[in-house]
């Protein structure tokens, strides 16, 4: 496994913060756009995509602000985590979703494309134009 680099992606959402937070922090919400199926037991979430399964622990949950997951099947370092942060721009009142993730340098473009695709799906589910 190579060296991973941290990156942040920002997406604008014209939707109430609580509606967005629900889609980022619950198994039901995440299964609508992030994975085919999501099951949670306490703070451990099992994500399933076309027969592939991965487990993550929800390590931070600040209502309507931040959700952070750490992949369980990897070392406990920060590079094996991802987070969703919701911010509101003071001047415009627009809601922004900031995704922080890590990828190996040669896989970063693919990882960004995957997030772009998933977030477009989330916007569609919320009735927003992607």
Image (spheres, rainbow, N blue to C red):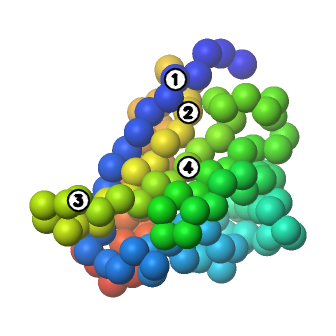
Question: If the image is split into quadrants, where does the C terminus sit?
Answer: bottom left
Inter-mark Cα distance, 2 to 4: 10 Å
Circles 1 and 2: CB distance less than 8 Å?
yes
The answer to whether any part of residue 95 appears in the image is yes
Residue that numbered label 3 is attached to: 89
Mark 1 crowd level (few <14, some 14–19, many ≥20, 10 Å Cα): few
Going from N to C along the chain, the mark reached first, 1 or 3, is 1
Residue that numbered label 2 is attached to: 102
Q: Which mark is residue 83?
A: 4
Q: Position of residue 1 (x, y in %)?
A: 72, 19
Horizontally, residue 78 falls left or right of residue 108, namely right
User: At numbered mark 3, what does the secondary structure look like: helix, strand or loop?
Assistant: loop
Q: Position of residue 118 (x, y in %)?
A: 47, 60
Mark 2 crowd level (few <14, some 14–19, many ≥20, 10 Å Cα): some
Residue that numbered label 1 is attached to: 5
**In the image, what residue occupies the spot 65% across and 41% down?**
81
Residue 100 in the image: above or below residue 119: above
User: At numbered mark 1, what does the secondary structure look like: helix, strand or loop?
Assistant: strand
Inter-mark Cα distance, 1 to 2: 5 Å
Circles 3 and 4: CB distance less than 8 Å?
no
Inter-mark Cα distance, 1 to 3: 27 Å
- In-front residue for pair 78/33: 78
User: At numbered mark 2, what does the secondary structure look like: helix, strand or loop?
Assistant: strand
Going from N to C along the chain, the mark reached first, 1 or 4, is 1
Inter-mark Cα distance, 3 to 4: 19 Å
Of badges 1 and 4, nearer the viewer stands 4
């Amino acid at each position: 496994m190579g060296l991973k680099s941290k990156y942040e992606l920002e997406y604008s959402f014209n939707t109430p913060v609580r509606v967005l937070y629900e889609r980022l922090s619950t198994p039901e919400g995440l299964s609508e756009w992030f994975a085919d199926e999501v099951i949670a037991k306490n703070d451990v979430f099992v994500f399933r995509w076309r027969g592939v399964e991965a487990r993550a622990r929800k390590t931070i949950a600040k209502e309507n602000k931040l959700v952070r997951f750490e992949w369980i099947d990897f070392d406990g370092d920060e590079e094996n985590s991802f987070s969703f942060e919701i911010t509101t721009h003071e001047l415009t009142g627009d809601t922004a979703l900031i995704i922080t993730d890590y990828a190996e340098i040669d896989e970063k473009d693919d990882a960004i494309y995957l997030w772009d695709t998933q977030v477009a799906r989330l916007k569609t589910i919320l009735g927003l134009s992607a």
